[in-house]
Image (tube, rainbow, N blue to C red):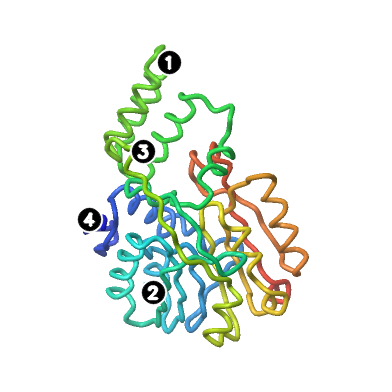
């Protein structure tokens, strides 16, 4: 079991997390950028929400602060991360009903092996090799240092002045790799690949969950599953698509997956918008976000 940390958020909430860095990233993405409430995506009191790839539950907490009487189904397959999700859901679920599932969603009921590093829990995936291959192959060490410095300054994990310092010294030969090492030590500590472990996790399909819980409608399905997003969508049976009003899906564009998922949504009569979250690293990692709204929901 990974040691849990108590992290104070800028809005005054205190949460459980595996590390402060990732809590800061999630807070900025969900509370500041409001990444899951853009381009016509709407949530109302009493809605049914699927949080697929819930991690420590930051999105569930966010929704609970804004809306009441929600029915939230939150899915997180990694046991250590699930423990933090459970703590946070119990502390911030006073006005909503939250069902927690220590499993992932996929195209079929099966067991899959995940790669998990407590220092990089946001990257836990059963497609570790494929994600590595989807990263920009043209990016230099300078590109990565610039992107990391800019993104860490956004979430106040380093100061804007320190970020400018890193960007300035990149013009000096041989200092790029040193910058990256310093950034790793400042924020994540030395990331030891040996600390990564493999965990076998249970997977089910969206349609299984719908049947088992007698769900008539899902108002919003948020999917952030580090390479498993297409698998999740393929686990929705034909008769269940019409039950889901909205999607927000983070897509790792592996093998032209972005266009495949857009086509899948359009075939089921969803209007889609493709965007990127405000992270420089996402550009290098080839990550996009799809916002999809069932056409009968569009005014």
Query: Mark 2 = which residue?
Result: 64
Query: Mark 4 = which residue?
Result: 3
Residue 134: horizontal and vertical position, in percent?
Answer: 59, 40
Q: What SS does tag 1 mark?
A: loop
Of callouts 4 and 3, the N-terminal one:
4
Is mark 1 in CB contact (under 8 Å) with mark 4? no
Of callouts 4 and 2, the N-terminal one:
4
Q: Residues within 10 Å of mark 3 (few under 14, many from 20)?
A: few
Is mark 4 in CB contact (under 8 Å) with mark 2? no
Of callouts 1 and 4, the N-terminal one:
4
Of callouts 3 and 1, the N-terminal one:
1
Q: What SS does tag 2 mark?
A: helix
Of callouts 2 and 3, the N-terminal one:
2
Of callouts 2 and 1, the N-terminal one:
2
Cα distance in 3D space between marks 3 and 1: 29 Å
Question: How many labels sit on residues?
Answer: 4
Query: Mark 1 = which residue?
Result: 171
């Amino acid at each position: 079991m990974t040691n849990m940390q108590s992290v104070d958020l800028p809005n005054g909430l205190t949460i459980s997390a595996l590390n402060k860095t990732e809590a800061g990233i999630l807070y900025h993405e969900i509370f500041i950028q409001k990444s899951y409430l853009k381009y016509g995506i709407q949530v109302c009191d009493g809605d049914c929400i699927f949080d697929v790839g819930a991690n420590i539950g930051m999105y569930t907490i966010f929704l609970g602060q804004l809306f009441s009487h929600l029915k939230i189904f939150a899915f997180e397959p990694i046991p250590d991360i699930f423990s933090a999700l459970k703590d946070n859901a119990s502390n911030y679920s006073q006005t909503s009903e939250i069902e927690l599932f220590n499993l992932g969603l996929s195209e079929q009921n099966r067991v899959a092996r995940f790669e998990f590093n407590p220092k990089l829990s946001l990257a836990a995936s059963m497609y570790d090799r494929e994600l590595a291959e989807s990263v920009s192959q043209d990016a230099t060490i300078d590109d990565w240092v610039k992107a990391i410095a800019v993104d860490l300054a956004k979430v106040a994990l380093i100061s804007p002045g320190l970020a400018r310092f890193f960007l300035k010294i990149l013009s000096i030969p041989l200092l790029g790799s040193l910058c990256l090492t310093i950034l790793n030590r400042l924020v994540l500590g030395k990331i030891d690949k040996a600390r990564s472990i493999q965990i076998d996790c249970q997977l089910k399909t969206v349609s299984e969950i719908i049947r088992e819980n007698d769900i008539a409608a899902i108002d919003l399905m948020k999917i952030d599953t580090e390479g498993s997003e297409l698998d999740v969508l393929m686990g929705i049976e034909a008769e269940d698509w019409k039950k889901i009003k909205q999607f927000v899906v983070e897509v790792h564009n592996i093998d032209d997956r972005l266009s495949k998922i857009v086509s899948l949504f359009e075939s089921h009569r969803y209007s889609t918008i493709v965007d990127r979250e405000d992270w420089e690293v996402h550009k290098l990692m080839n990550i996009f976000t799809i916002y999809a709204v069932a056409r009968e929901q569009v005014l």
